[in-house]
Image (tube, grey):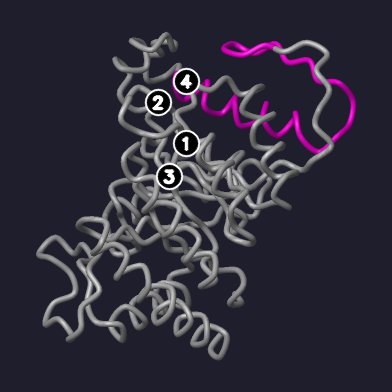
């Protein structure tokens, strides 16, 4: 694995009252060379900005950073229209978008907003079907007709723009298998990383499903939502009693992330700093200017 294969991003707040801070931080991250800004997608919360409108605005105000809904609330965004949205964003930004997909959390709120109330099994079926439909409606070619169980289109022309990478937030065994069959990346739930039981039991399900579908399991990248504090002095313990990463000094972060890439095959890290906007601003600066360049340099030397 080479340094460009590993992506580094940060998770941003999307409150309507945080617009000024959001734009400032994303512009700074763009200038500092981060790869991704990650936004949540919970349209039923009126106090939050819409993820896709916000991504479009941020891409129009930056030069190289990509936008990413972590993860798209699929039941409230029909896949044919989602395909149009992400291919349009890709065309306008020069490919600076990643499609994150989830089966949909908070089913009651989804139904309250007019979305379908899927059973858990139906949600996974719709999830896999939607990914395939989005991909079929990108990259040009003949008109698409799809008569699926949950989604139908008839004679729809694909966009001439390639589909963006599709990363999922799969948790259950069936959705993990779907990720292995049709997705390009996986974000373990609950900020799990390579030392967690969740990762150790989940990743093999993805790999087995990918291999059964004739894919190389390495095609499905693992990208981590990685919360933690960046401290001035080293911490005596960088993980809690349950083995969860809590942070540490710059050198401790660099050692941990480099190990994650070189020894465990991780493909990316999205920082979720704790605290309020001012604290996030400080953490983001240290992440982008001190930790990420050092990890990239170390990986490039040792890969």
Residue at x 62% of width, y 72% of height:
4
Query: Mark 2 and mark 1: span between their CA atoms?
Result: 8 Å
Q: Nearer the N terminus, badge 3 or badge 4?
A: 3
- Left or right of 45? Residue 95 is right
- Residue 151 is situated, as x and y percent measured from the top left of the image, at 62, 14
For residue 75, the mark is 4
Q: Secondary structure at mark 3?
A: strand
For the residues carrying marks 3 and 4, which lies nearer the camera in this image? 3
- Left or right of 249? Residue 53 is right
Q: Secondary structure at mark 2?
A: loop
Residue at x 48% of width, y 49% of height:
186
Q: Which residue is mark 1?
A: 51
Q: Nearer the N terminus, badge 1 or badge 4?
A: 1
Mark 2 touches mark 1? (CB < 8 Å)? yes
Image quadrant in which the N terminus is located: bottom right
Q: Which residue is mark 3?
A: 39
Q: Nearer the N terminus, badge 1 or badge 3?
A: 3
Q: Is residue 124 magenta?
A: yes
- Residue 206 is situated, as x and y percent measured from the top left of the image, at 49, 46
Q: Which residue is mark 2?
A: 43
Q: Secondary structure at mark 4?
A: helix
- Residue 66 is situated, as x and y percent measured from the top left of the image, at 58, 54
Mark 1 touches mark 3? (CB < 8 Å)? yes
Q: Nearer the N terminus, badge 2 or badge 4?
A: 2
Q: Which residues are magenta?
A: 123-152
Residue 283: quadrant of the picture: bottom left
Query: Mark 3 and mark 2: span between their CA atoms?
Result: 12 Å
Query: Mark 1 and mark 4: span between their CA atoms?
Result: 14 Å
């Amino acid at each position: 694995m080479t340094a460009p294969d590993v992506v580094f991003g940060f998770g941003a707040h999307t409150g309507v009252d945080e617009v000024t801070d959001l734009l400032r931080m994303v512009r700074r991250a763009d200038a500092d060379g981060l790869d991704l800004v990650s936004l949540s997608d919970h349209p039923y919360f009126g106090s939050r900005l819409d993820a896709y409108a916000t991504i479009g605005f941020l891409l129009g105000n930056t030069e190289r950073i990509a936008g990413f809904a972590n993860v798209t609330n699929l039941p409230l965004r029909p896949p044919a229209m989602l395909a149009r949205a992400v291919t349009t964003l890709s065309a306008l930004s020069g490919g600076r978008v990643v499609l994150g997909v989830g089966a949909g959390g908070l089913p009651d709120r989804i139904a309250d907003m007019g979305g379908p109330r899927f059973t858990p099994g139906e949600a996974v079926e719709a999830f896999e079907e939607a990914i395939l439909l989005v991909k079929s409606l990108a990259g040009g070619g003949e008109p698409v007709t799809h008569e699926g169980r949950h989604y139908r289109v008839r004679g729809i022309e694909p966009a001439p723009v390639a589909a963006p990478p599709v990363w999922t937030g799969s948790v259950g065994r069936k959705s993990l298998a779907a990720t292995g069959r049709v997705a390009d990346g996986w974000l373990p739930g609950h900020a799990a990383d390579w030392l967690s039981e969740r990762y150790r039991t989940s990743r093999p399900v993805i790999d087995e499903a990918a291999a059964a579908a004739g894919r190389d399991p390495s095609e499905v990248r693992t990208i981590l939502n990685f919360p933690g504090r960046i401290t001035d002095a080293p911490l005596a313990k960088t993980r809690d009693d349950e083995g969860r990463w809590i942070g540490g000094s710059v050198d401790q972060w660099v050692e941990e992330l480099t190990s994650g890439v070189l020894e465990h095959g991780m493909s990316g890290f999205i920082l979720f700093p704790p605290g309020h906007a001012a604290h996030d601003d400080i953490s983001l600066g240290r992440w982008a200017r001190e930790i990420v360049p050092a990890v990239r340099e170390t990986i490039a030397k040792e890969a």
